[in-house]
Image (cartoon, grey):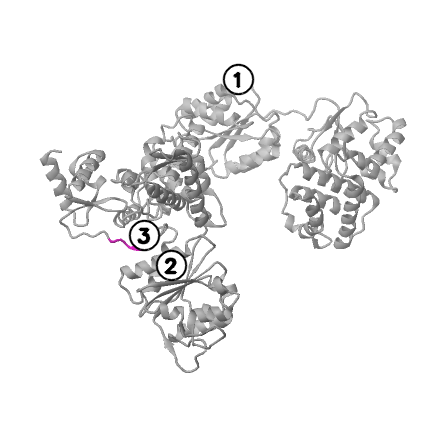
Amino acid sequence: MKESTRRHLLQGIGEEQVGITTTELAKKIGLSRSVTSLYLNELAKDKEVIKSETYPIVWRLTSHDFHTLQDVFEQFIGSKGSAKSMIKTCKAAMSYPPKGLPVLIYGNSGVGKTYLAHLIFDYLNQQQANCSDNIVVFNCADYANNPELLSSTLFGHKKGAYTGADKDKKGLLSKADNGILFLDEVHRLSYENQEKLFQFMDSGQFRLIGEEDKVETANVRLIFATTEDPKEVLLPTFLRRISAVLELADYHLRPLQERETILRVLFLKEAKLLKKDMMIDRLIFDRFLHEKMSGNIGQLANKVKLYCADALHYQEDKDVLYIGDNHDDVVKVIYDEPLNQLVDVSKEMPEKLNVLLHSTSDVLELRETLLGFPLSKDDFGGETYVLKQIREKILANTKQIMGKVDSVTPYLEKLTTYLLLKDCIKFDHQPIKQMISMDYPRTALFAKKITSKLPVEYKKEARFLLSLFLIGSIKEEIAYHALLVAHGDTTASSIQAVSNQLCGNYVFDAINMPLDASIKDIVLEVKSWLSERDTSEGVIMLVDMGSLVHFYKSLKPEIMGELLVVNNLTTSFALEIGQQLLNHHTFYDITKNIKQKFITDIQYFEGFSNDRNVIISSILGYDIAKKLKKLFEPFINPEIKIIVMHFNELLDILDRENSDKGYLDTTELIITTSYLDNKTAVSSVNLLDILDEDTEHQAMKYTFRNTIHEKYMTDLTNKCIYFFSKEGLSEKLNFLNPEIIIKQVELIIEKCERRFGIKFNVKIKFNLTMHLALMIERTILGSVDYPVPTDLSLLKVNDNYFYSNIKDLLSSIEDFYRISISDWELYVLHEIIAS
């Protein structure tokens, strides 16, 4: 480098007593960050400047009084994040005169209890504190089955104290004098030993085992550790003397960024040991990142070692070690990186940002401040794996909605940098959030959409920052909300992406519905979408619904303004409406243009079926309904169409009939195996009435008069009775042994009668027998679990809570067949019993 440049750099660094980051220096002297970094490393090589060991990298002149001693707790990953409060408590306990307070570290196996105890020892040494000469470690589980030996180990014994005590022996308390005694698995101490220990904690005095007169003293700091709930395993008198309980979270409960740092450090340790850079298959890294392990970090460390050992076996002569099969999509670990917390943040920068963030009350001013702040993620060790995933998810979500990603790419660098600092900067600026929601609602909704799939711990901050950064990119002047709704995994969203891309802005939202979704399901999804929007101006929906009347009537009460529902969902149609929205056409004009330009239907009515029909549906299941169709086909007038449907579909149709009178005008009869609560003009019959001796068969003939000739009724009745008999049930079972299953369900029915205090008639018993047997077979095969329309825990039968009781009654059958019966099946069971 030129001499003038060298002097310029040294002068820029020298003016900052506390040092300066690469980015700050680059801005100060007018060079790019990469060039500045190159020159600084040259100066460091020549020993003219000193480079700090943690991030952000801070540069100082060698002549400055600078030493690199860091707070040892910074080695504890999470010390400035999730464990910040715990470390603060720990330091306070250690600093209390004259020799600190007793500390209990609580957490599951492998979370780092022993590691933290040794960090406490290092911290005390660093502070040159009292009682920091040494640390004595003992696991109380070693002698848990021999309390006397454990007592001797702790306190020491006199010669002759017990058989085999042939000389005086010092205990751990004496060995730890002027130091630390760390007792792991302290819950394995007997109550007697806990009492002796808390007496020592009170007085600093103890007696050797076998000593009656002489009192020993020791100046000891006590640190305990346990995997058990302290309140459950320690004497209250002992626990009261422990001032600080430090709880360590399981690995899978730690923040995602901390888990990444832990994982990188584990791989980095192995890389340093082997002196090889590592390239870790992203799938392996991702699995380790999200894996739930009973052994936590300890178990994870062993897995990392095993993977490294396996890779080394095949690649011993290679300079770079590839972990896993994928050598292209990898996470890099460079073995000569500093072995420290890879993401560490200085205090000054977050404090500056916090002041700026909360001293600004103007949205646009805050936006410019944050976008212009001299900060780069390179100051913090570069982009992490987690932040790379966040970037990719935001880009994928944006592309799905907009068809391209150029609206967000200019802001991702700043976004990911600020997310690195999220534990140090308070982005929860409520006044600014409220202003954005009021003044830039479409931008706020778009930010929410593209951050919807982010890890929960980053979602709030990412949504706030993007809603701020994207102001001006999203048109707020569009008066009406527009929604595309279609059946299929990607039908609506595909049209949305193309339409928004060609319109050049965020105009349409989309809802993709499963192919078997009912009108009721779709209405619920749309209501959820509406609840997040101001609908006072109006809403336009393009759908592929078929009939629109029920859809329109169900949604209109949810909307403050106008509602237009159009049964035409194509890209060209969406583009036409999109352009009209961008050109600020009125709601009336858009409606009129649609009618003039396109052959389409707006709010038109159609019936359920154009043909005369009979609907067959059974609460016992779709398979039963299909078998009933087979039974009825020879008897029903051939001009009448038989329609089979799921029972929940039937309920949806009956709801629709109640709102759209005439919807079931062509339906002659509804055949079921239960009573229908829905009031409808269409006749319905519960086939189980045939089994009831009190049933007026003349009335049954009257019900079937328009669909089945009277001469066939006797034969049909006999076939129905057989269908619902035990013999008929045997034929319907695919693989279960009829004799065994029928005995099992009959026993359950008897228990139900006793538990709920009811007596089932023959008809209900038949219904229950068939339902339970087929339910068990369905569950074994993996039946569909439909949403339950009510809270099962509130249902009662004869003042007895249904859910808890029926779960208890069915537990033996679940254990026998190793199944778990779904809530939908239990709901159906309740409907049968309650009837």
- Going from N to C along the chain, the mark reached first, 2 or 1, is 2
> Callout 2: few (<14), some (14-19), or many (20+) C-alpha neighbours within 10 Å?
many
- Going from N to C along the chain, the mark reached first, 3 or 2, is 3
Viewer-side label of 3, 2: 2
In-image side of 387 versus 378 (left or right): right
SS at mark 3?
helix
Q: Is 183 covered by the magenta stretch?
A: no
- Going from N to C along the chain, the mark reached first, 1 or 3, is 3
Q: Is 71 covered by the magenta stretch?
A: yes
**Horizontal and vertical percent position of residue 594:** 51, 20
**Horizontal and vertical percent position of residue 169:** 40, 72
Give the overall secondary structure of the magenta segment: loop
At 32% from the left and 31% from the top, the residue drawn is 410
* CB atoms of marks 2 and 1 within 8 Å: no
Mark 1 residue type: Phe
At 89% from the left and 31% from the top, the residue drawn is 714
> Callout 1: few (<14), some (14-19), or many (20+) C-alpha neighbours within 10 Å?
few
The answer to whether one can see residue 583 in this image is no
Q: Which residues are magenta?
A: 69-73
3D distance between C-alphas at marks 1 and 3: 67 Å
Per the image, the residue denoted by label 3 is 74
Q: Residue 598 got which mark?
A: 1
SS at mark 1?
loop
Viewer-side label of 2, 1: 2
Between residues 21 and 234, which one lies in front from this camera angle?
234
Q: Residue 117 got which mark?
A: 2
- The quadrant in which residue 374 appears is top left
* CB atoms of marks 3 and 2 within 8 Å: no
